[in-house]
Image (cartoon, rainbow, N blue to C red):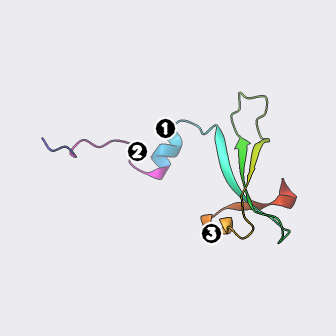
Amino acid sequence: MSCCSKRTGYSSPLDAFNKGPREKLLYVTAISANEKEPDALVTVDVDPESSTNGKVIHVLKMPNVGDELHHTGTYLSFSEI
């Protein structure tokens, strides 16, 4: 028996969506609207059992202006949080 013959995980993204555990936290890049301020990584609580569900629970500002977090994909503007 090969080490890789047993499949793990889900058969498709839809299968993971339907059968996998629900996320409790989202990490979103927040792009600064002010060119003199750094971008940030925002943590959003999405656990329906949590008292802070749907709220930003942490903002981690990047150490430098121009770190270009917008290259990571989905993001919010600071004006949206």
Q: Residue furthest left?
A: 1
* In-image side of 2 versus 38 (left or right): left
* Circle 2: residue type: Tyr
At a point 82% along the width and 65% down the height, the residue shown is: 37
Magenta segment:
4-13
Residue type, label 1: Lys
Which residue is nearer to you in this view: 64 or 75?
64
Inter-mark Cα distance, 2 to 1: 8 Å
Q: Secondary structure at mark 2?
A: loop
Residue, disc 1: 19
- Residue 41 location, x and y as percent? 70, 53
Residue sitting at 29 percent across and 43 percent down?
A: 7
Q: Badges 2 and 1: C-beta atoms under 8 Å apart?
A: yes
Q: Quadrant of residue 43?
A: top right
Residue 69 is tagged as: none
Please tell me which of labels 2 and 1 falls first in the chain.
2
Residue shown at the point (68%, 34%) measured from the top left? 47
